[in-house]
Amino acid sequence: MYRLFVLFLFFGIVFATNKVEQVHLSLNGNMDEMVVTWLTQGPLPNVTPYVSFGLSKDALRWTAKATTTSWKDQGSHGYVRYTHRATMTKMVPGDQYYYKVGSSQDMSDVYHFKQPDPTKDLRAAIFGDLSVYKGIPTINQLTDATHDGHFDVIIHIGDIAYDLHDDEGDRGDAYMKAIQPFAAYVPYMVLPGNHESDSNFNQIINRFTMPKNGVYDNNLFWSFDYGFVHFIALNSEYYAENHKKEANAQYKWLEQDLAKNKQKWTIVMFHRPWYCSTHSASGCNDYSDMLSRKGNSEMPGLEKLLHDHNVDMILYGHKHTYERMWPIYDGVGYKSGDSGHIKNAKAPVYILTGSAGCHTHEGPSDTTPQSFSADRLGQYGYTRLKVYNSSMISTYFVDTSDKVGNFMDRFYLEKD
């Protein structure tokens, strides 16, 4: 009896540590592929992790093997986790697919997604600074909107979970489980903020799977095309953390990426804001934030490069509020007749969207408006982006403190 009890206990522990967790999708830049990533708390010795997928939940006819990365948390105990990554290939844009992931030791539930169709309008949710603490209303509304078919991609522009590494990584596990109800159904893209920089970006490198950039291929900066848009994600923390080699490598990559970009719209995202209203009358002016914009003798600034390549829109977070700016270059705002509909902008339009929900929050009453500020909001929420065609895109803010998700600050950007 004792031997049976020990055997039962052993297999119970194995099952618990090898249970599939934290399933999430991501894009890799190929419109006929979809990446799925998941985690187990224990290893899978002599077992092959994989994804099964197909056009019906009852007929998952195709499989793709996963690769596994074992990595150690930076906490005092150094717990090891196991991230599994698989790529579904030969997907047909617009088709709905069903899938499940795991191994012979445990399989997930069946999830589904619609393969991105670049011929249709692109609909994205974009935000920064989201945690479970004070972020549940946003997570719930993102989940509802995902299952109502409102998104093609969700992009989180830094400061994830507050923090992924806290509590020996348990905080990151809890957050990833909380977002699985939307991240398992629509691509969830991430880029680093200051809260991901701990231990040389250990958590964001090992928990996620972003497009490869050919330099470091470690999720910290990347780009992809989607229909009329070229999306670029940059790591502003290279500057704030004084990572000179990496900042220069990123700059060189960005020069090449922009030079070969042929898309009609270019949208750039990073974490630290360059322009915004703050408590100070001079607005955003923290040295660590401005460094990626202006650069110094050892790390080149990014603003001129982005302006010279006609970037249309720049989104960031870090400040826990929402603000949309007029087109700006080198501190000068370019105003026109209607702040809600700008045509042929002379510089990028800037949107600060850091109010998804975390430990602190700010509203208009907490800041001094800058001359280039077009709208400021104090609600919790996120930004929705819609790309209609080669000449029109729009954004608006979704107030997730309102149970129905009130839409605010509707904005249209148009060009010939």
Image (cartoon, rainbow, N blue to C red):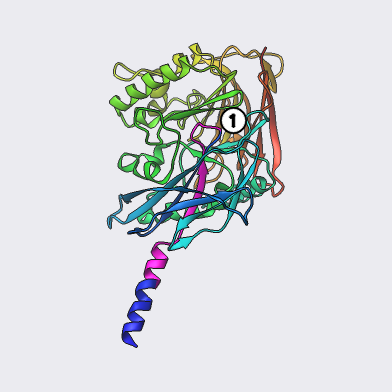
Q: Using the rendered view, name the quadrant where residue 42 is placed.
A: bottom left
Can you name the residue that lies furthest to the bottom here?
1
Where's residue 21, x and y in %?
47, 56
Residue 169 vertical placement versus 27 (above, below): below
Tell me: 307 left or right of 365: left
Q: Nearer the viewer, residue 154 or 101?
A: 101
The verdict on residue 288 being magenta is: no
Tell me: 305 left or right of 338: left
Count all numbered tags in the image, as a single digit: 1
Residue located at (50% from left, 15% from top): 331
Q: Nearer the viewer, residue 111 or 259?
A: 111
Can residue 134 be seen here? The reply is: no
Where's residue 345, x and y in %?
62, 14
Circle 1 sits in a helix, a strand or a loop, which is it?
strand
Magenta-drawn segment:
12-31
The residue beneath circle 1 is 323
Can residue 142 be seen here? The reply is: yes
